[in-house]
């Protein structure tokens, strides 16, 4: 299944901002590299949306370069990115974060 549009919800954008801030502490331009890498992963949903396994009711795609997971849902031809979370967090925290009311349609930030 292909997506014609990718929607990044506000919570997911905030996750990306937090990741960039974290990696900016590790060296010059590392945060920008994180940002660009994760956006590239998200953009690949145009081709690969819907092929990933589901976890907590959402599709789960691993980032190619950083230990992050991109949670998304597909509704028609729109892939909605719900969250972008570090894999090294406690699985209970991740589950509560994903189950915390992040549903497509609650936000309208589009990429």
Image (cartoon, grey):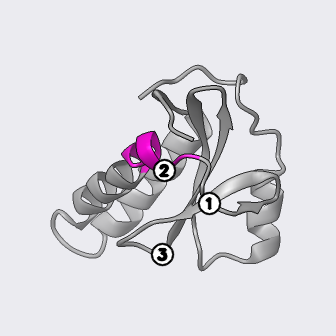
Query: Mark 1: which secondary structure?
Result: loop
| Separation (CA) of disc 1 from disc 3 | 16 Å
Q: Main secondary structure of the magenta part?
A: helix
- First in sequence, mark 1 or 3: give its number: 1
Badge 1 is on which residue? 52
48 within the magenta span: yes
Residue 17 pos. (x, y %): 43, 48
Query: Mark 3: which secondary structure?
Result: loop
Q: Is 94 on the left or on the right of 40, as rendered?
A: right
Badge 2 is on which residue? 48
1 and 2 marks in contact (CB < 8 Å) = yes
Query: Mark 2: which secondary structure?
Result: helix
Q: Is residue 9 visible?
A: no
Q: Vertically, is 18 above or below 108?
A: below
Of residues 14 and 50, the one drawn nearer to the viewer in this rendering: 50
Residue 8 pos. (x, y %): 52, 35
Q: Is residue 29 visible?
A: yes
Badge 3 is on which residue? 67
Residue 6 pos. (x, y %): 48, 32
Q: Which region of the structure is painted magenta?
A: 42-49
Q: Vertically, is 95 above or below 92?
A: above
Q: Residue at x 51, y 38 (%)?
A: 2
Q: Quadrant of residue 19?
A: bottom left
């Amino acid at each position: 299944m292909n997506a014609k549009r990718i929607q990044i919800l506000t919570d997911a954008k905030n996750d990306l901002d937090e990741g960039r801030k974290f990696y900016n502490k590790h060296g010059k331009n590392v945060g920008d590299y994180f940002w660009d890498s994760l956006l590239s992963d998200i953009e690949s949903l145009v081709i690969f949306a819907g092929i990933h396994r589901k976890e907590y009711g959402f599709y789960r795609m691993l980032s190619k370069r950083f230990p992050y997971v991109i949670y998304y849902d597909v509704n028609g031809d729109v892939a909605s990115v719900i969250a972008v979370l570090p894999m090294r967090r406690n699985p209970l925290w991740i589950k509560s974060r994903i189950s915390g009311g992040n549903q497509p349609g609650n936000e309208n930030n589009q990429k």
